[in-house]
Image (cartoon, helix red, strand yellow):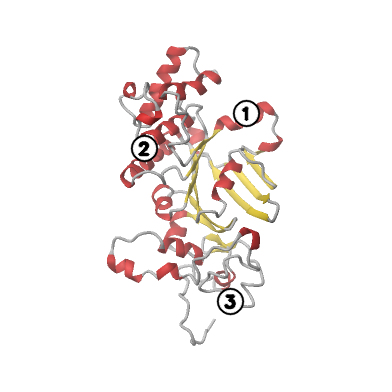
């Protein structure tokens, strides 16, 4: 039940398209644009990493991609079809093909179900196992796939008898039980210890390579995106918008948007000399994130941006445009395009004369 065809694994067609998607939440006192005009694609067998600070809209985007939340505007298409125009059977097939792995392994599993019951329930419900014996055999195969061996040691256990890493592997095994084409992993390693996190990422990588499963991988850590999505693409979100989007090596090694640079500067650096060269606070003018209920005019990042220009960045909202082999939403970076190897200049000292 785990095998995909060679065509599935190597196809480059758009498995999922997120087109001009927005999500607005309304309260008694405010309108909150959690996601605003996002465009993303995930190809078959590809990893797309979606990164940004907490509250930037990553999880809301992921929930819409999984069909768990309906967008206020825009379309979510799977295999070329708008998922919200599908009939009941078609939507059920979509929900089978796209599986979600939650952040918290302590809350995502039913505490009164054994591992065997957790894994066999979807198999029986969707007719992938004809009887109890066949369901048990497939459950053991799933546990081997996520490196929980020997499977017999885990099938009878309840979630509270497992470590955090083991629980998350069971959650991944459950997602694999329906032979998905796309897995949406929402901060699925953030609550794990570092050593367990690496093992988890290696396991997910083997699923990507062996089964041709595509991933929409949500994380706040660009180091994780670099490790897991190096051969894929990375989209950086800020306050509901994508501000930089392109091949992961380009985004990580030569970041163009000042927010992407700030995220990279926040990654711990073991080399003291390299750490000393990083600007404190990522070089940002402010650590305070604006409220969605009262977004700044123009570019929403300009109050924190070290290269923002008065009369431009605080007036006009930048579009996401091609820059240096990726797309960037920044007036200053777009103006200075033509030097793809150059890094963004640090802010000039007070009193210095700008030559730009």
Q: CA distance from mark 1 to mark 2?
A: 30 Å
**Neighbour class for label 3 at 10 Å: few (<14), some, many (≥20)?**
few
As drawn, the label of residue 92 is 1
C-alpha distance separating marks 3 and 2:
46 Å
Q: Nearer the viewer, residue 42 or 96?
A: 96
Q: Does residue 29 appear to the left or right of 231 in the view shown? A: right
Above or below, comparing residue 133 to residue 141 in the picture: above
Percent across and percent down for residue 185 are 48, 41
> What label sits on residue 309 in the rendered view?
3
Residue in view at x 61 percent, y 44 percent: 17
Q: CA distance from mark 1 to mark 3?
A: 49 Å
Q: Where's residue 286, x and y in %?
A: 50, 69
Element on which disc 1 rests: helix
Q: Which one is earlier in the sequence, the residue at label 3 or at label 2?
A: 2
Mark 2 neighbour class, 10 Å CA radius: few under 14, some 14 to 19, many 20 or more: many
Q: Which residue is mark 2?
A: 165
């Amino acid at each position: 039940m785990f095998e995909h065809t060679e065509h599935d694994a190597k196809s480059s067609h758009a498995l999922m398209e997120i087109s001009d998607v927005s999500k607005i939440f309304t309260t008694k006192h405010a309108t909150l644009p959690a996601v605003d005009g996002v465009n993303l694609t995930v190809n078959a067998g590809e990893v797309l990493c979606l990164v940004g600070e907490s509250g930037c809209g990553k999880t809301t985007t992921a929930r819409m991609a999984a069909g768990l939340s309906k967008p206020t505007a825009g379309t979510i298409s799977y295999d070329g079809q708008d998922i919200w125009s599908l009939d009941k059977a078609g939507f059920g097939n979509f929900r089978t093909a796209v599986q979600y792995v939650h952040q918290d392994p302590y809350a995502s599993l039913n505490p009164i179900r054994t591992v065997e019951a957790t894994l066999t329930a979807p198999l029986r419900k969707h007719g992938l196992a004809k009887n109890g014996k066949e369901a048990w055999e497939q459950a053991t195969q799933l546990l081997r796939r996520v490196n929980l061996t020997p499977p017999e040691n885990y099938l009878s256990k309840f979630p509270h008898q497992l470590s955090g890493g083991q629980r998350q592997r069971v959650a991944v095994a459950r997602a694999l039980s329906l032979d998905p084409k796309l897995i949406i992993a929402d901060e699925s390693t953030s609550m794990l210890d570092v050593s367990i996190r690496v093992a988890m990422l290696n396991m997910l990588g083997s699923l990507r390579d062996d089964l041709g499963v595509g991933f929409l991988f949500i994380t706040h850590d660009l180091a994780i995106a670099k490790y897991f999505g190096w051969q894929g693409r990375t989209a950086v979100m800020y306050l509901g918008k994508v501000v930089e989007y392109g091949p992961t090596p380009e985004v990580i090694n030569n970041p163009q948007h000042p927010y992407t640079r700030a995220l990279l500067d926040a990654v711990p650096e073991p080399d003291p000399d390299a750490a000393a060269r990083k600007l404190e606070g990522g070089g940002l003018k402010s650590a305070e994130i604006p409220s969605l209920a009262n977004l700044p005019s123009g570019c929403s990042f300009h109050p924190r941006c070290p290269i923002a220009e008065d009369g431009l960045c605080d007036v006009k909202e930048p579009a996401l445009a091609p820059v240096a082999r990726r797309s960037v939403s920044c007036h200053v970076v777009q103006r200075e395009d033509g030097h793809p190897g150059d890094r963004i200049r640090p802010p000039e000292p007070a009193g210095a004369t700008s030559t730009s």
